[in-house]
Image (spheres, rainbow, N blue to C red):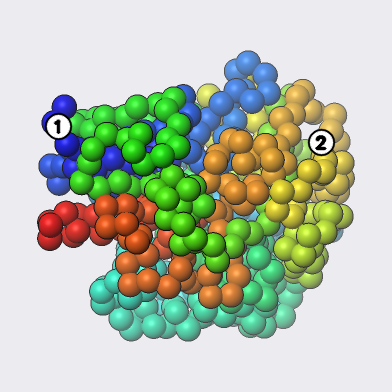
């Protein structure tokens, strides 16, 4: 090992591993330190319930992962990453047994919304379908980092994306289209009236039409393991089981890159109050189930979907998200669910299934939402409880233990509220740089934000490379 490393990366989540890979590919000497016993961060797989049932403790479905420019530039398939697609990307069932769906086909999606909104949906997505590659590169970055690849489409998408989902939904007349849009916007963990929530919804819809919403064979760990394997091929080193508490505990290096929360970075690197104004958002209450059979959805479409959203109306979805933001106990939660074993039999013993679900709760909430979650599940899948073999429950405190970046259980590593929606972690020309010239941040707290796509690590690595090359 050289006397001084070029870069040390703290945190082996997808962003930390991506940053490490991109620096190592440039010929730099890179070492990664991870507090956990395995790599992965928010992309891991474990036996949380019973032997043979492989669950994803954090992320499970990856529409931005399969379409990530950073991941596409790496030979991850050769290193074991295989994407699996359910027949339908997403189903959004309603109490009458019908469902809206999101699929690779714009036409099929539009028709599921009913004749009153099929045309409006086609018109909404038509300018952008078939242009994922440039859209992804233009939007999964810091807005002022160079000129966009497709300026006209970038501007057109931006005008729609900056809107609240509530405003975007005025294009539709029926509850199916509005419910589908509100559910997609709910991934931002903010009320649908929030700035840019319409953009979140539109981006997820376009991702489905272009690449689908897949799961990795074997679980989300496959993404992290492929990244780690590629890093080692490039000569990088990974050290697990080492919690970094101070910068001077790390070996000498020209740059230090942190895949951590801004709070942890400020503490470790002694940056004082650099991120005191950074805000964390509400949390989730997550349950992983081992089931004796597939979920008995009333809506046939939900039985064929990798992801199922449960919110009977746009109004109920917005109320559930608003309650979490306002610090209220969940009553009728909006649920995001995933059923990976319908396309990946390796995830559970033969004939059995794993099932993943979360609803939104206030930051740090210490209650038990199991009953309200399962009541909502039974509303759309009567008899669900009869299939439960075991459950692993995780509220905000447990989620924060699973991933230290989830401060207060915030799985987005930062609130989607006000200017912080687009200026993360604070207003800066280079948001990955810090007051310390050798210290950088590459976590989901930086642009483009949360999701297993590695793009925050990709852009942070570019910032590090520019700094080191200029030195």
Q: Which residue is mark 1?
A: 3
Q: Quadrant of residue 350?
A: top right
The mark tally for this picture is 2
Residue neighbourhood size for the residue with mark 2, other residues' Cα within 10 Å, grouped as few (<14), some (14–19), many (≥20): some
Expressed as whole percent of the image width and height from the top left, the position of residue 140 reads: 39, 63
- Is 260 placed above or below 111 here? above
The answer for how far apart the CA atoms under marks 2 and 1 are is 59 Å
Q: Residue at x 70, y 53 (%)?
A: 363
Nearer the observer, 461 or 43: 461
| Image quarter (top left, top right, bottom left or bottom right) of the C terminus | bottom left
The label shown at residue 323 is none
Q: Residue at x 83, y 48 (%)?
A: 376
Q: Nearer the viewer, residue 394 or 468?
A: 468
The residue tagged with tag 1: helix, strand or loop? loop
| Residue drawn where x is 35% and y is 27% of the image | 239
Residue at 41% across / 39% down in the picture? 246
Give the percent coordinates (x, y) of residue 281. Answer: 64, 59
Q: In the depicted view, which residue is nearer to us: 45 or 423?
A: 423
Residue 22 drawn at (x, y percent): 24, 47
Q: Work out which quarter of the rendered image holds the N terminus and state it.
A: top left
Q: Is residue 102 above or below residue 226?
A: below
Q: Which residue is mark 2?
A: 384
Whether pointer 2 and pointer 1 mark residues with C-beta atoms closer than 8 Å, the reply is: no
Q: Earlier in the sequence, mark 2 or mark 1?
A: 1
| Res. 82 in view | no
Secondary structure type for disc 2: helix
How packed mark 1 is, by other alpha carbons closer than 10 Å (few <14, some 14-19, many 20 or more), is few
Residue at the far top in the pictured view: 51
């Amino acid at each position: 090992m050289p006397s001084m490393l070029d870069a040390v990366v703290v945190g082996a989540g997808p962003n930390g591993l991506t940053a490490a890979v991109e620096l190592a590919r440039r010929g730099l000497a890179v070492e990664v330190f991870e507090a956990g016993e395995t790599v992965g961060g928010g992309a891991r797989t474990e036996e949380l319930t019973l032997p043979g049932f492989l669950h994803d403790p954090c992320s499970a479905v990856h529409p931005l992962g399969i379409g990530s420019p950073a991941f596409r530039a790496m030979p991850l398939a050769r290193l074991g990453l295989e994407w699996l697609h359910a027949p339908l990307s997403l189903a959004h069932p309603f109490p009458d047994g019908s469902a809206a769906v999101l699929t690779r086909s714009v036409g099929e999606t539009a028709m599921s919304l009913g004749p009153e909104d099929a045309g409006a949906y086609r018109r909404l997505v038509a300018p952008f379908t078939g242009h994922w590659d440039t859209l992804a590169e233009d939007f999964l970055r810091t807005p002022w980092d160079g000129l966009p690849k497709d300026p006209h489409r970038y501007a057109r998408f931006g005008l729609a994306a900056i809107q609240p989902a509530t405003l975007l939904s005025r294009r539709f007349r029926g509850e199916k289209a509005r419910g589908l849009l509100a559910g997609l916007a709910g991934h931002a963990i903010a009320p649908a009236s929030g700035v840019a929530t319409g953009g979140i919804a539109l981006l997820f819809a376009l991702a489905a039409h272009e690449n689908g919403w897949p799961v990795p064979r074997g679980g989300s760990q496959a993404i992290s393991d492929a990244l780690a394997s590629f890093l080692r091929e490039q000569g990088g080193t990974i050290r697990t089981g080492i919690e970094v508490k101070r910068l001077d505990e790390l070996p000498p290096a020209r740059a230090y890159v942190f895949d951590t929360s801004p709070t942890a970075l400020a503490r470790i690197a002694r940056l004082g109050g650099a991120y005191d104004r950074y805000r964390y958002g509400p949390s989730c209450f997550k349950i992983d189930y081992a089931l004796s059979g597939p979920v008995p959805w009333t809506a046939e479409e939900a039985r064929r979907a990798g992801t199922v959203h449960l919110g009977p109306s746009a109004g109920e979805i917005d109320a559930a998200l608003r309650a979490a933001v306002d610090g209220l106990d969940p009553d009728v939660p909006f649920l995001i669910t995933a059923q990976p074993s319908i396309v990946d039999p390796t995830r559970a013993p033969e004939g059995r299934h794993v099932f993943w679900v979360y609803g939104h709760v206030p930051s740090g909430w210490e209650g038990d939402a199991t009953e309200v979650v399962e009541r909502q599940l039974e509303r759309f899948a009567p008899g669900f409880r009869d299939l439960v073999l075991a459950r692993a429950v995780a509220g905000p405190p447990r989620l924060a233990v699973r991933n230290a970046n989830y401060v207060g259980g915030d799985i987005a590593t930062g609130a989607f509220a006000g200017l912080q929606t687009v200026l993360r972690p604070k207003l800066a020309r280079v948001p990955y740089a810090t007051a310390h010239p050798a210290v950088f941040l590459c976590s989901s707290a930086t642009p483009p934000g949360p999701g297993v796509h590695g793009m925050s690590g990709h852009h942070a690595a570019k910032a590090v490379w520019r700094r080191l090359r200029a030195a």
